[in-house]
Image (tube, grey):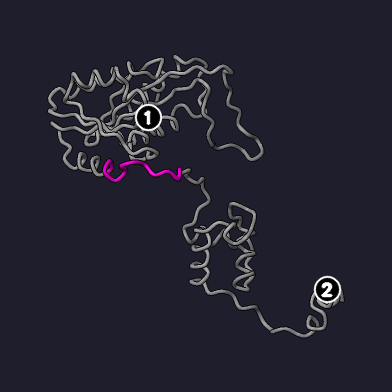
Amino acid sequence: MNRWRQRFFADGLDGLRNGATGRRRRLCRDKLSTFLLALVETSPRDWNYQRSRWSSELMAKVIHDHARDFIHPSTIRRLLREFGIVYRRACPTLCIKAPDKEQKLADIAEALKHASTTHPVLFVDEADIDLNPRIGADWMRRGAQKRVPTPGQNRKHYVAGALCATTGKVTVRYGDSKCSGLFIDLLKALKRRYREAERITLVLDNYIIHKSRETCAWLARHPQFVCLFQPAYHPWVNRIERLWKAMHDTVTRNHQHRSLANLLVAVKRFLRTASPFPGGRHAMAKV
């Protein structure tokens, strides 16, 4: 009786008429996959909702409103996995055009094409080593969050590195400040390591120590070094960023070292086992 009352209050006399018998028609799988794939490429704002990200409940509602088919949110989540759609962190991107982007990318591609023993190409960058651990995901019991002790007052150290594009060999130097001196120490190490090279091409970002007066003066005295600056806001062009990510994932994330000296020992051990990179040895290396 309550069901009939609800139908009458919702739709009047039309609600009392019998609808179609049998199970409701469902969207065919191909049409549903096409609809979902198109849906995730948009934002809920495009459909006049206030949310900025999709939820399975909101997807189910949009499907019901536009395709007249009811699908439970749990079914939506299962289908998304089947269609290869995953829930993950978005990538921040600045809506700023990098000057000379195409030309810089073309120069880097040309250098990589002709890389050799006498003309090595190296990806160069610096990374911060913090005593305060970077917090990351880990396995733990449900409802029992792991505790990572922190020293409270942070201390920092820095590592400058160069990754050879052809061999994967890593050259590093360490310092207590990220200054031109640290970068020049790395250049001196590269000069010794690649003493047979006629030209050494460096792919690096636009950080100030790469263009300082001290650095430019040193480079002027060593014309075998050629600097190719990557486009602004394009860190993924520099392959050594993957090495720094692996270092943080393996060593500095959730670390429990009480002193910076012990942490640096672990970092140096990692960089020794990671060369040549990528090689995969660092992931299973023992202490």
**Which residue is at the front of the view, 184 or 81?**
184
Q: Residue at x 47, y 26 (%)?
A: 252
Q: Nearer the viewer, residue 273 or 117?
A: 117
**Residue with the mark numbered 2:** 6
Is residue 201 at least partly visible in the picture?
yes
Q: Is residue 12 above or below residue 270?
A: below
The circle drawn on residue 171 is none
Amino acid at pointer 2: Gln
Residue topped by disc 1: 285
Q: Residue at x 44, y 27 (%)?
A: 251
Q: Nearer the viewer, mark 2 or mark 1?
A: 2
Q: Amino acid at mark 1?
A: Ala
Q: Position of residue 13 (x, y in %)?
A: 82, 83
Q: Which residues are magenta?
A: 94-105
- How packed is label 1: few (under 14 Cα within 10 Å), some, or many (20 or more)? few
Q: Which quadrant does the N terminus fall into?
A: bottom right
How crowded is the residue under tag 2: few (<14 C-alpha within 10 Å), some, or many (20+)? Answer: few
Write the residue at 21% across / 29% down. 226
Q: CA distance from mark 2 to mark 1?
A: 66 Å
Q: Would residue 22 appear left or right of 188 to someone viewing this image?
A: right
Mark 2 vs 1, N-terminal side: 2
